[in-house]
């Protein structure tokens, strides 16, 4: 089972600051797969939609 820890997040941030899109995408996929393996489909979907930009097509939720 894949586990998301501080090292995973740190490597994701490093890839971003280094401008290494391939490495960044690899860590994003790892995080999505880890959430799916843990049965956390909603979390996986949130990350996937942020990564591919499809969240912009979703209706905005406003809480009063």
Image (tube, rainbow, N blue to C red):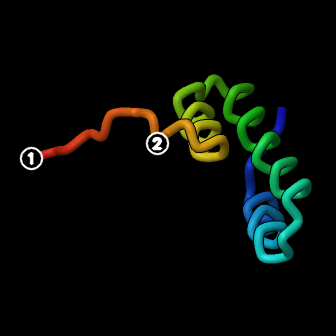
- Tell me where residue 15 appears, x and y as whole percent: 84, 67
Q: Quadrant of residue 38?
A: top right
For mark 1, give the secondary structure: loop
- Tell me where residue 14 appears, x and y as whole percent: 81, 72
Mark 1, residue position: 64
Mark 2, residue position: 56
| Vertical arrangement, residue 47 with respect to residue 36, above or below | below
Residue at image position (68%, 34%) is 35
Residue 62 versus residue 58: which sits nearer the camera? 58
Q: What's the mark number on residue 55? A: none
30 on left or right of 32? right
In the current view of this chain or complex, which residue is farthest to the bottom?
A: 17
Query: Label 2: few (<14), some or many (≥20) within 10 Å?
Result: few
Q: Quadrant of the N terminus?
A: top right
Residue at image position (87%, 48%) is 26
Residue at image position (80%, 58%) is 8
Q: Quadrant of residue 6?
A: bottom right
Q: CA distance from mark 2 to mark 1?
A: 21 Å
- Tell me where residue 3 appears, x and y as whole percent: 78, 44
N-terminal of the pair, mark 2 or mark 1, is 2
């Amino acid at each position: 089972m894949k586990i998301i820890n501080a090292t995973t997040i740190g490597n994701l941030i490093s890839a971003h600051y280094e401008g290494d899109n391939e490495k960044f995408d690899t860590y994003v996929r790892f995080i999505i797969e880890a959430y799916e393996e843990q049965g956390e489909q909603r979390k996986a979907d949130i990350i996937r939609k942020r990564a591919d930009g499809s969240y912009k097509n979703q209706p905005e939720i406003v809480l009063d």
